[in-house]
Image (tube, grey):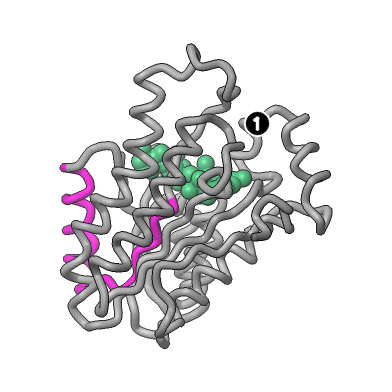
């Protein structure tokens, strides 16, 4: 699919990955709506970068734990741009809680992680489905994590939320075919990001030592893969790992 003239909605566009994805989609020709929850300055920087590439941009505030806010934001984006062709479910929240410390993983933390990382992407997909279907060539790309493929990440809740997002990808690929493709990028640790900085340094060192390339996931590769999924005509329900070559994901 040629992305020129298309409209993409990137959640978490104020964050590290969302900013890169927004710029890559704009470089490929799409106008970009992007969401943030608290970091308005980051969202404006991303919007400015998209506009500098000659594309339209709008930043929308959503707490995607709130179903009413999701519906309102979807309406705002559709009203503003007249259409939405691509949804990138990138926004997420994490907190470092060792797997063995079950008591630290409270019901409140569990709910915050699952509502943000799994229910939010479903509700956004549902709200935008009629618009993604409208021209017969919609795209959803979910940003999960290798923590959704094997049990190692910032917390059990985060791992479970990303496993759910990976399976949601497959379920929505069935539900929205043939008008919308639904695919997923599963990054490993991305050094230097705000999210990675919430992890203990020894965890980051251990990940770098495990990956066969000796370097962790590249934001540029993740953004490029999002664009590749959007361009593809016959790929749906797939998960692509970008992690520097973790042996655990080579199967
Ligand atoms: N960084 C990594 O090492 C890594 C590894 C594997 C997977 N990933 C995945 O990659 C994606 C992007 O991560 P990142 O590194 O770019 O993280 P980030 O810089 O922390 O960005 C997270 C984004 O999510 C938004 N967000 C958080 N809670 C939200 C809520 N309740 N409602 C709406 N938006 C909310 C944030 O908004 P504000 O900026 O306004 O707070 C921000 O835009 C996530 O899905 C993450 O799980 C990251």
Query: Who's the residue at 52% across and 76% down the image?
Result: 228
State the residue lying farthest toward the front.
251
The crowding category of the residue bearing disc 1, from other C-alpha atoms within 10 Å (few below 14, some 14 to 19, many at least 20), is: some
The image position of residue 246, as x and y in percent, is 72, 53
Q: Is residue 81 a member of the stretch shown in magenta?
A: yes
- How many marks on residues? 1
Quadrant, the C terminus: bottom right
The image position of residue 102, as x and y in percent, is 50, 16
In the image, is 47 to the left or to the right of 211?
left
Q: Magenta residues, as a range?
A: 68-90
Query: Who's the residue at 45% across and 38% down the image?
Result: 160
The image position of residue 43, as x and y in percent, is 44, 51
Q: Which of 27 and 66 is in front in this view?
A: 66
Q: Examine the rendering and report whether any part of residue 8 can be seen.
A: no
Quadrant, the N terminus: bottom left
Q: Is residue 71 a member of the stretch shown in magenta?
A: yes
The image position of residue 217, as x and y in percent, is 68, 55
Query: Who's the residue at 58% across and 33% down the image?
Result: 154
Query: Who's the residue at 77% across and 51% down the image?
Result: 211
Identify the residue under disc 1. Answer: 199
State the residue lying farthest toward the top.
103
Circle 1 sits in a helix, a strand or a loop, which is it?
loop
Q: To which quarter of the image does residue 249 belong?
A: bottom right
- Is residue 31 positioned above or below 197 on the image? below
Q: Examine the rendering and report whether any part of residue 189 can be seen.
A: yes
Which secondary structure dominates the residues rendered in magenta?
helix
Q: Is the CB atom of the residue marked by disc 1 within 8 angstroms of ligand 1's nearest atom?
A: yes
């Amino acid at each position: 699919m040629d992305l020129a003239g298309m409209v993409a909605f990137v959640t978490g566009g104020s964050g590290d990955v969302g900013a890169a994805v927004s710029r890559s989609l704009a470089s490929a020709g799409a106008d970009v709506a992007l969401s943030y929850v608290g970091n308005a300055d980051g969202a404006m920087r991303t919007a400015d970068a998209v506009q500098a590439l000659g594309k339209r941009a709008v930043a929308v505030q959503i707490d995607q734990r709130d179903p009413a806010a999701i519906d309102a934001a979807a309406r705002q984006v559709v009203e503003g741009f007249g259409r939405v062709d691509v949804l990138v479910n990138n926004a997420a929240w994490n907190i470092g809680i060792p797997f063995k410390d079950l008591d630290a993983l409270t019901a409140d933390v569990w709910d915050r992680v699952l509502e943000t990382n799994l229910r939010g992407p479903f509700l956004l997909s549902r709200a935008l489905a009629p618009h993604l279907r409208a021209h017969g060539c919609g795209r959803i790309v979910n940003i999960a994590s290798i923590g959704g493929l094997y049990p190692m990440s910032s917390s059990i809740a985060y791992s479970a939320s990303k496993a759910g997002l990976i399976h949601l990808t497959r379920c929505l690929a069935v539900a929205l075919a043939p008008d919308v493709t639904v695919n997923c990028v599963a990054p490993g640790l991305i050094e230097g990001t705000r999210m990675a900085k919430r992890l203990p340094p020894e965890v980051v060192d251990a990940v770098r030592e495990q990956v066969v390339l000796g370097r962790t996931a590249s934001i540029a590769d993740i953004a490029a893969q999002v664009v590749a999924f959007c361009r593809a005509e016959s790929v749906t329900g797939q998960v692509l790992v970008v992690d520097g070559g973790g042996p655990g994901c080579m199967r």
